[in-house]
C-alpha cells in the first residue's frame, strides 16, 4: 500500500447554516455591524399582522363555536315530512284572515273566499306549509303556541301593541319559543309621513326588545282593491320560505308524538242519529303525526277532554 492511503483523511470544517447556534451567531454578528432587523421584537405584542388573515381566523373560530353549541338534531321523520305550521296571531280586526288569503294567493295563485280552519299548501316538490289563524281566547293561544313552527304576529300600526300580543309571547316562552316574525298593518291611516316614520322606528325598537335584537318586522302599507300590495306580500313570503329552510326543530317536540287535527268528520250512521239524537257519536280526525311514533297503550292527552290510553295503532 502507498503511504497516502495509510494516513487518516480529515474533512474540512462545515459552518452551521441553521439551528439555534447559527441563529445566535447571526444575531451577534448583526449587533456588531449595527444592522437592525425589521421584524417585530415581541411576536406576542400584536395578535395579527394582516387584517384579512385576522378576519378569516375570526370567522373560523365563530364557526367552530356555533358547531359546538348547535349539536346536530336527529330527524325522526320518515317519508314525506309533515307540513310546517305557520300561526298567524293578532288582536281582533288587525287583518289575520286577509294576510292568510294574500299568502295563499301568492303561493297557489288561487283566491280563497273565506278562511275556515287550517289551510295547507304545497311549496316545491316536498315542502308543505299550513296556515293556522290563532283565535283570541287563551286556550286557543296555548294550543297554537305548542304546535307553531313559525309565528307571525300582526300589529296594528295605528294603535300599537295590544295585550293579546304580549299574552301570546309569554305563552310561547313557556311552551318552547319558535321563530317569530312581526307584521305592521293599517299604516295607510297615517297622513303625516314624518309621524309614520317615527311610529315605525318606535314599534321596531319595542318589538326587538320583546323578542330579540334584530327580529324581523315587515310593513303592509295599505289595501289596493281590498288586497295588500303584491310586492310586500312577495317580500313576506320569501322570508317565510327562508325561515322554514333554516328551521331548527325543538328538542321537546321531536321526542314527544302529537297530532294537529286538520279536519273532523262525524261517521256515525244516520239511522242511529234519527233514532236517538243523544247517542254516542263516532268522530274521525284527520291530521299529521309529528315528533316520534305512537305506540299501543300509551297515554294521550286530548285538549279539553282529558287523558286516555290508545286502544290500537295501525299504519
Image (cartoon, rainbow, N blue to C red):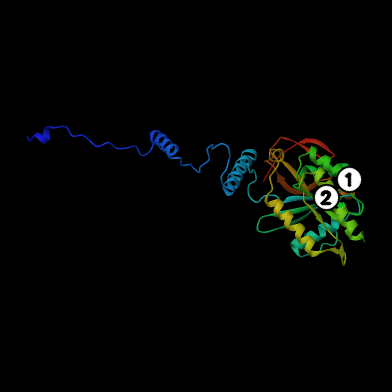
Instruction: Please identify the quarter of the rendering in which residue 99 is found.
Output: bottom right
Q: Is residue 143 above or below residue 238?
A: above
Where is residue 299 drawn, in percent x and y?
75, 35
Secondary element at tag 2: helix
Q: Is residue 281 above or below residue 240?
A: above
Where is residue 56 drawn, in percent x and y?
58, 47
Q: Which residue is mark 1?
A: 164
Where is residue 210 drawn, in percent x and y?
82, 43
Q: In front here: 229 or 16?
A: 16
For this orientation, the residue located farthest to the bottom is 225
In the rendered structure, the answer to whether residue 274 lies left or right of residue 125 reads right
Q: In front here: 52 or 242?
A: 52
Q: Which residue occupies 60% across, 47% down?
A: 55
Q: Which residue occupies 70% across, 49% down?
A: 82
The answer to the question of whether label 1 and label 2 lie on touching residues, with beta carbons closer than 8 A, is no
Q: CA distance from mark 1 to mark 2?
A: 18 Å
Q: Residues within 10 Å of mark 2 (few under 14, many from 20)?
A: many
Going from N to C along the chain, the mark reached first, 1 or 2, is: 1
Q: Residues within 10 Å of mark 1 (few under 14, many from 20)?
A: some
Where is residue 29 drawn, in percent x and y?
41, 37
Secondary element at tag 1: helix
In the rendered structure, the answer to whether residue 46 lies left or right of residue 283 reads left
Q: In front here: 305 or 130?
A: 130
Q: Is residue 66 visible?
A: yes
Instruction: Please identify the quarter of the rendering in which residue 94 is found.
Output: bottom right
Q: Is residue 185 above or below residue 205?
A: below
Residue 140 numbered mark, or none: none
Residue 204 numbered mark, or none: 2
Amino acid at each position: 500500500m502507498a503511504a497516502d492511503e495509510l494516513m487518516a483523511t480529515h474533512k474540512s470544517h462545515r459552518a452551521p447554516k441553521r439551528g439555534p447556534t447559527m441563529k445566535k451567531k447571526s444575531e451577534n454578528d448583526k449587533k456588531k455591524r449595527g444592522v437592525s432587523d425589521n421584524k417585530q421584537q415581541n411576536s406576542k405584542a400584536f395578535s395579527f399582522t394582516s387584517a384579512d388573515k385576522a378576519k378569516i381566523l375570526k370567522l373560523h373560530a365563530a364557526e367552530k363555536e356555533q358547531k359546538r353549541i348547535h349539536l346536530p338534531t336527529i330527524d325522526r321523520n320518515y317519508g314525506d315530512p309533515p307540513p310546517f305550521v305557520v300561526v298567524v296571531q293578532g288582536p281582533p280586526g288587525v287583518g289575520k284572515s286577509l294576510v292568510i288569503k294574500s299568502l295563499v294567493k301568492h303561493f297557489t295563485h288561487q283566491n280563497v273566499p273565506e278562511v275556515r280552519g287550517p289551510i295547507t299548501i304545497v311549496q316545491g316538490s316536498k315542502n308543505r306549509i299550513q296556515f293556522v289563524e290563532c283565535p283570541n281566547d287563551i286556550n286557543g293561544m296555548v294550543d297554537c303556541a305548542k304546535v307553531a313552527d313559525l309565528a307571525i304576529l300582526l300589529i296594528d300600526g295605528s294603535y300599537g301593541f295590544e295585550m293579546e300580543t304580549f299574552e301570546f309571547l309569554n305563552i310561547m316562552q313557556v311552551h318552547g319559543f319558535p321563530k317569530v316574525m312581526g307584521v305592521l298593518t293599517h299604516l295607510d291611516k297615517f297622513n303625516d309621513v314624518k309621524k309614520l316614520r317615527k311610529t315605525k322606528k318606535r314599534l321596531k325598537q319595542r318589538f326587538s326588545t320583546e323578542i330579540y335584537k334584530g327580529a324581523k318586522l315587515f310593513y303592509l302599507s295599505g289595501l289596493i282593491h281590498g288586497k295588500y300590495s303584491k310586492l310586500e306580500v312577495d317580500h313576506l313570503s320569501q322570508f317565510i320560505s327562508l325561515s322554514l329552510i333554516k328551521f331548527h326543530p325543538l328538542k321537546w317536540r321531536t321526542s314527544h308524538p302529537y297530532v294537529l287535527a286538520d279536519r273532523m268528520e262525524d261517521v256515525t250512521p244516520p239511522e242511529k242519529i234519527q233514532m236517538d239524537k243523544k247517542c254516542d257519536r263516532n268522530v274521525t280526525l284527520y291530521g299529521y303525526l309529528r315528533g316520534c311514533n305512537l305506540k299501543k297503550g300509551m297515554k294521550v292527552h286530548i285538549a279539553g277532554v282529558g287523558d286516555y290510553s290508545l286502544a290500537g295503532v295501525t299504519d
